[in-house]
Image (tube, rainbow, N blue to C red):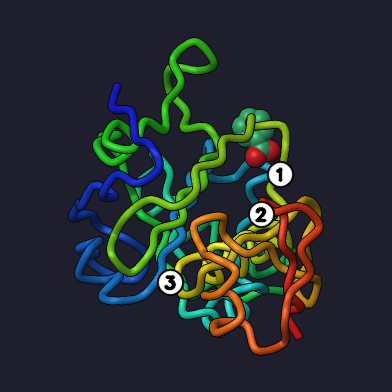
Amino acid sequence: MNMIRLGDIAPDFSAESTEGSLDFHEWLGDRWGMLVSHPADFTPVCTTELGAMANYEEEFEARNVRIAAISIDPLKSHFNWIKDIEETQNARVDFPIVADEKGEVAKLYGMIHPNNDATMTVRSVFIIAPDKRVKLILTYPASTGRNFDELLRVVDSLQLTYYEYLATPANWKNGDDLVILPSVSNEEAERLFPKGFVEVKPYLRLTPQL
Ligand code: BEZ
């Protein structure tokens, strides 16, 4: 079982998907990516999740994030299931769902947790930065549907840290104050953050986002 850790290069793969052949790194290009695995087609929680994902696609696109789903089911099953998702979730699925019938991608990404279930992928989320490095890994059990507001929140946070010298505090939401990275000196912070900052402690400095 492959183990991926934060900072690793996301494994590349080629696979068939509902949007045609997918060469993962090439498909990502210089964008961010989010790859989510689901346990199986035609299951209730997965149906709601993929519908939600479709309805959030614009939000991900606005953040330059390409999204894809994957399970160990054949392409034909994915296509048939999409009809149900669109019918029941008021959604249009036009992101790729990878058909990983042999479980090759699942193995590469460690999406099968044999002590949980040897045949189904767990609900994994991998968020990948433009340098192809894995920035977030989340693992949910089959019985817990993911929260796509949370995933957008994490993307917002990751992008702040990726492009600026900032981090986000507990329960941060877009618009709240941001944490200045400890590696930034006060002199640099004055230059980098024209809105100023509050030094609560020398290691805890906050600057307004808006
Ligand atoms: C579901 O998506 O509803 C589901 C999938 C596998 C096991 C249990 C629930």
Q: Is mark 1 within 8 Å of ligand 1?
A: yes
Q: Within 10 angstroms of label 1, few (less than 14), some, or many (20 or more) residues?
A: some
Q: Does residue 83 appear in this view?
A: no
Q: Quadrant of residue 175?
A: bottom right
In the picture, the disc for residue 66 is 3
As measured in the structure, the alpha-carbon distance from the residue carrying label 1 to the one carrying label 3 is 20 Å
In the image, is residue 22 above or below residue 138?
Answer: below
Q: Which residue position holds label 2? A: 49
The front one of 161 and 127 is 161
Q: Residue reaching furthest top?
A: 115
Where's the N terminus, which quadrant? top left
Q: Is residue 73 above or below residue 67?
A: above
Q: Is mark 2 within 8 Å of ligand 1?
A: yes
Mark 1 falls on what kind of element?
A: loop
Q: Which of the two discs, 1 and 2, labels the residue nearer the N terminus?
A: 2
SS assignment at label 2: helix
Q: Which residue is mark 1?
A: 145
Question: Measuring 72% from the left and 82% from the top, which residue is drawn there?
Answer: 196
Q: Amino acid at mark 2?
A: Glu
Query: Which residue is drawn at the image coordinates 20% and 52% (left, top)?
Result: 12
x, y percent for residue 113: 46, 21
Quarter containing the C terminus:
bottom right
Whether disc 3's CB lies below 8 Å from ligand 1 is answered no
Q: Give residue 160's position: percent from left, percent from top.
A: 56, 71
